[in-house]
Amino acid sequence: MTPISKTPVPNDQSTYIADFASRSTAIEERAVAGRSNSWSATATTDEFKKGMRRLAGGVCLITTFAHDQPSGLVATSVNSLSMEPPSLLVCVGRGSNSHDSFVNSGFFCVNLLNSADEDLARLFGDPSMRAQRFAKGNWERLMTGAPALNGALANFDCKLVRQFEYGSHSIFVGEVCQIRLASEDISPLIYLNGAYTSCASGALT
């Protein structure tokens, strides 16, 4: 019987662990490359849009202040990223008129809308009403200078610390500088299947 060869273990355990981790990473990278090369993507943009319309999302207004004027857009593509430091990410299409304002200012505020804010969400989603977006609602500027909507379920005032490009969008990573929370029951505005809706309100804890 042919004896099974074994990789010699260095006397220095840390060297062995580092070598093992390096070889494991290389194996994983080759495996991922092999899998991706064997796939033939069939998903279309239209199918992707239809599928994502079925993912319910909380509606937010992402706002900033650049070139001596407020700017913002309505979005559902907001996610928490890290607890330490508190941070979140926002995905913004590079074709958006507000995109460069976020880049130039270096800060933004994520305003979580409640179910009574549907008209405001529609206003921010209408390109023809861009100049009137901040005429509705009660706004004030927080620590960074970004406009914060009074009465929102929560305001996350962020400084822009990272920006990544992928496909049609920029991914903005914001480190949260200030948080303001509503004092009433939570009744969020939800976007689902191309329409605004709401869910049952819940008591604050």
Image (tube, rainbow, N blue to C red):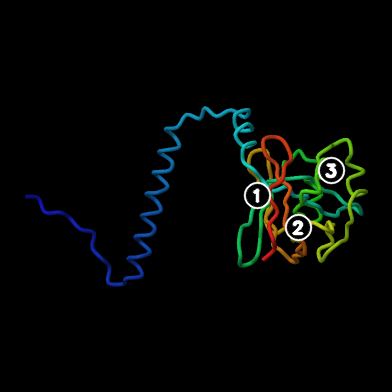
Q: Which mark is residue 119?
A: 3
Q: Amino acid at mark 1?
A: Phe
For mark 1, what is the residue?
A: 164
Q: Secondary structure at mark 1?
A: strand
In the rendered image, residue 151, in percent from the top left (x then y), is placed at 82, 58
Q: Residue at x 43, y 43 (%)?
A: 32
| Tag 2: amino acid | Leu
Residue 122 drawn above or below residue 86? above
Q: State the separation of the CA atoms marked 3 and 1.
A: 32 Å
Q: Quadrant of the C terminus?
A: bottom right
Residue 153, image x and y in percent? 75, 57
Disc with the residue nearer the chain's start (3 vs 2): 3
Verify CB contact (< 8 Å) between mark 3 and mark 2: no
Mark before the other along the chain sequence, 3 or 1: 3
Q: Is residue 108 left or right of residue 165?
A: right
Instruction: Please name the residue shown 88% across and 45% down the image.
Output: 133
Q: Is disc 3 in contact with disc 1, using a CB cutoff of under 8 Å?
A: no
Task: Specify whether 156 is left or right of 48.
Answer: right
Residue at the spot of label 2: 153
Q: Secondary structure at mark 2?
A: loop
